[in-house]
Amino acid sequence: MAQGEKPNSLEELDERLQAARQRRNGTVKGKSGGRSGEQGLGTALRIGVDLVAAIGVGVGIGLLLDHWLDTKPWFLIGFFLLGAAAGIVNVVRVASGYGLAAGYKKSGD
């Protein structure tokens, strides 16, 4: 420490810690941290891919079973509905945070 310099007070240290926590969480007042936008875009992309993939897998299985068993279009309809239901369940899980790993908490907790 240089001469004439006084040590930081606890209030200044507390302010610096709060500012660092806000920067880490992307909640800086008056500024868009950029991270929350990227995180939102990533979540939206994941939701879209989950929904399309689940429906695609359901339709694919339905088409294969219909072709193999010559029951067109019954398995296609059934597995389309099953895939759509699975996709919607995945969307709800992502949107509500059920897919978080053990030990992690949502930022609001």
Image (tube, grey):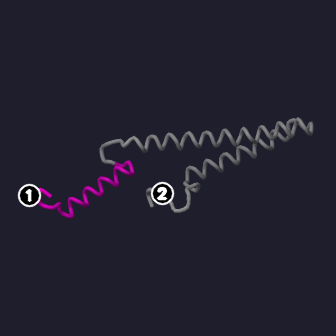
Q: Say few, some or many: other residues with alpha carbon within 10 Å of mark 1 (under 14 / 14 to 19 / 20 or more).
A: few
Q: Which residue is mark 1?
A: 3
The image shows residue 17 at horizontal and vertical percentages of 29, 58
How far apart are labels 1 and 2 at the CA level?
45 Å
Q: Is residue 108 above or below residue 44?
A: below
Q: Which residue is mark 2?
A: 106
Q: Secondary structure at mark 2?
A: loop
Q: Amino acid at mark 2?
A: Lys
Q: Is residue 12 above or below residue 81?
A: below
Q: Secondary structure at mark 1?
A: loop
In magenta segment, residue 20: yes
Instruction: Give residue 83's quadrant in the image.
Output: top right
The residue at the point 70 percent across, 48 percent down is 86
Quadrant (top left/top right/bottom left/bottom right) for the N terminus? bottom left
Q: Nearer the viewer, mark 1 or mark 2?
A: 1
Taking the view exactly as shown, the residue that stands out farthest to the left is 4
**Label located before the other in sequence (1 or 2):** 1
Taking the view exactly as shown, the residue that stands out farthest to the front is 2
Q: How many marks?
A: 2
The image shows residue 46 at horizontal and vertical percentages of 58, 42
Q: Is residue 3 above or below residue 80?
A: below
Instruction: Give residue 31's quadrant in the image.
Output: top left
Q: Amino acid at mark 1?
A: Gln
Q: Which residues are magenta?
A: 1-27
The image shows residue 74 at horizontal and vertical percentages of 86, 40
Q: Say few, some or many: other residues with alpha carbon within 10 Å of mark 2 (under 14 / 14 to 19 / 20 or more).
A: few
The residue at the point 49 percent across, 60 percent down is 105
Q: Is residue 81 above or below residue 96?
A: above
The image shows residue 63 at horizontal and vertical percentages of 82, 36
The residue at the point 78 percent across, 37 percent down is 60
In magenta segment, residue 3: yes
